[in-house]
Image (cartoon, rainbow, N blue to C red):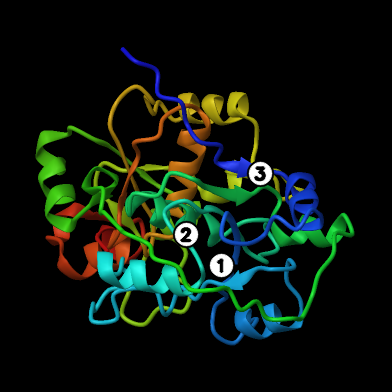
Amino acid sequence: MVHQVLYRALVSTKWLAESVRAGKVGPGLRVLDASWYSPGTREARKEYLERHVPGASFFDIEECRDKASPYEVMLPSEAGFADYVGSLGISNDTHVVVYDGDDLGSFYAPRVWWMFRVFGHRTVSVLNGGFRNWLKEGHPVTSEPSRPEPAIFKATLNRSLLKTYEQVLENLESKRFQLVDSRAQGRYLGTQPEPDAVGLDSGHIRGSVNMPFMNFLTEDGFEKSPEELRAMFEAKKVDLTKPLIATCRKGVTACHIALAAYLCGKPDVAIYDGSWFEWFHRAPPETRVSQGKGGKA
C-alpha cells in the first residue's frame, strides 16, 4: 500500500502572522474569513468589514451554494464554485487558508476546507485556533477590504468525498459505510430542538453514531492532537481503516469529523451534504430515530 502524503490541514496563527508580515498573501496564498452566524446573533460580513486578517477575503457561504435546492447549504455546481473562488483571486496553484470568528475557535472553516477538497483542490488549510486566537495573541487586523485580482480556478468534483440521500439510504441495508453524526447529543437523541428550525424535529438517522463536533476542539479553541482524536474515534468504536460518512444538520459541522479523521491520517471521509435536514423531509419514518415525540422524528 502506498502511503499518501497528506497536505497540512492546519496552519498555526504564528505561521500565518509571519506569512502576512512577509507580504506573502497574494496569488500564491489566499486567506478567507468563512464566518457565518445564526440570524439575529452576530453579523459575519459586518464583523469582517470591521476587522479581519490583513489580506483576507470574505467567503460568503450563502452565496457559494446551490440556491435552487430546497435543502440547507448544498454544494454549488463545479462552475459555480470555480467562478466564486476565482473572483477571490484563487487559482489551482493557490494555498488557501480558511478561518472563522466563532467563539468555539472553529465552526464554518472546516466546511470551506472540505468544499475546496471536494472540488479537487489539495492545498487548503484551516487556521488552527481561528480568529479568536489570532486576536487573543495580538496579531494584526485591518478593516481594509481586500481586492484580489481575479484568477482562473478549474473545479473537478471528487464524488468519493460526497454522499447523496440515495447512497445513505442504500447504506442502511448494505452497511458499507460507518455513519457518524456531529450534532450535540440532545439534538441527536431528539431530546433538544433543532435551533432556528421550523417544521424540523430533532433526532438521527438509524444506525448513526454520535460524536459532537465541539469535542474535537480544546477549551481554547484549538484542534485536539491526533492521539486524542484517535482515542475519541476508538471510544465510539469508529474504525478509521474502514469507510466513513459524516452527517449533521446541514453538512457543515460534519466537516469537523472529516477534518479530525484527516488529522489521524484518513483523508477519505465523505460528507452527506443534505444531512438531517434532507433526511427528515425525505426518508421513511422508520429510518428516523428520536427519543422525543413518541420515538420517531
User: Does residue 73 show up?
Assistant: no
User: Does residue 108 show up?
Assistant: yes
Contact? badges 3 and 2 (CB < 8 Å): no
Coordinates of residue 203 in the picture (x, y in percent)? 34, 59
The residue closer to the viewer here, 87 or 110, is 87
The residue closer to the viewer here, 273 or 109, is 109
Q: Which mark is residue 11?
A: 3
What residue does disc 1 label?
A: 34
What residue does disc 2 label?
A: 112
Residue ID at (58%, 73%): 148
Location of the C terminus (image quadrant) = bottom left
Label 3 environment density (alpha carbons within 10 Å; few <14, some 14–19, many ≥20): some
Coordinates of residue 168 in the picture (x, y in percent)? 18, 49
- The amino acid sitting under disc 1 is Ala
Residue ID at (82%, 56%): 21
N-terminal label among 1 and 3 = 3
3 to 42, vertically: above or below: above
Q: Residue furthest right?
A: 138
- The amino acid sitting under disc 2 is Val
Residue ID at (30%, 69%): 76
Secondary element under disc 2, as helix, strand or loop, is: helix
Secondary element under disc 3, as helix, strand or loop, is: strand
Contact? badges 2 and 1 (CB < 8 Å): yes
Coordinates of residue 108 in the picture (x, y in percent)? 53, 62
The residue closer to the viewer here, 223 or 191, is 223
N-terminal label among 2 and 1 = 1
N-terminal label among 3 and 2 = 3
